[in-house]
Image (cartoon, helix red, strand yellow):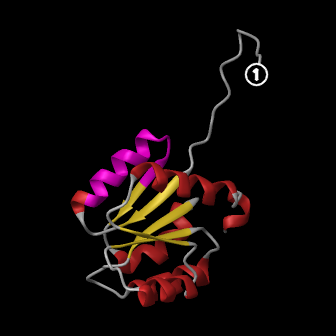
Amino acid sequence: MLYQNENQPPPMVERQRIMLVDNDQDMSNFLNLTLEQEGFDTVVVVDAGSAANMLDSLNPDLVILDTLSPDQDSLEILDRMRKRSKVPIIMLSAEYEADTMQKALLHGADDYIRVPFGIKPFIARIRAKLRRTPHNESQ
């Protein structure tokens, strides 16, 4: 337990930032609300093509990348992100082909979650990735 002088304000707890790359507005809204309720700061990016270029300015602790992007191949986006950063990347997919999951992992994804998914295991997987990747090592 942390004790402090009552004249001092409580220490600020830095919220971890998650960049959510998904063009599905319903899914983005759901995940954004859920992640915010779990104590994360979220930034929703609907243009997957520019997501890799936004890594430096947004400086996220973790990226959630949907595999079904109409504007660009998600593996290409993943490759571009990997060239810029070591930030943990979790792929979300409605695809159930083992080959798709294998390709995503080989291209540098840290995890691959199929939709639909249970929210508690999803949050647990996010927290596990964040525990194993200190922010100063993610860039």
In the rendered structure, does residue 73 fall within the stretch colored magenta? no
**The quadrant where residue 135 appears:** bottom right
Front one among 95 and 34: 95
Q: Is 62 situated left or right of 7 in this image?
A: left
Q: Is the magenta stretch mostly helix, strand or loop?
A: helix
Quadrant placement of the C terminus? bottom right
**Which residue is farthest top?**
6
Q: Is residue 58 above or below residue 124?
A: below
For the residue pair 40 and 6, the one nearer the viewer reads as: 40
The residue under the point 52% across, 53% down is 17
Element type at mark 1: loop
Q: Return the x and y of residue 78 as percentages of the image width and height.
A: 49, 82
Q: In which quarter of the image is residue 82?
A: bottom right
Image height of 110 relative to 129, above or below: below
Q: Which amino acid type corresponds to the residue marked 1 in the rendered image?
A: Met
Span highlighted in magenta in the image: 27-42
15 horizontally vs 137: left or right: left
User: Which residue carries the number 1 mark?
Assistant: 1
Expressed as whole percent of the image width and height from the top left, the position of residue 100 reads 42, 87
Task: Note whether 107 is above or below 44 in the view shown.
Answer: below
Classed neighbour count for the residue bearing mark 1: other residues with Cα under 10 Å, few (<14), some (14–19), many (≥20) = few
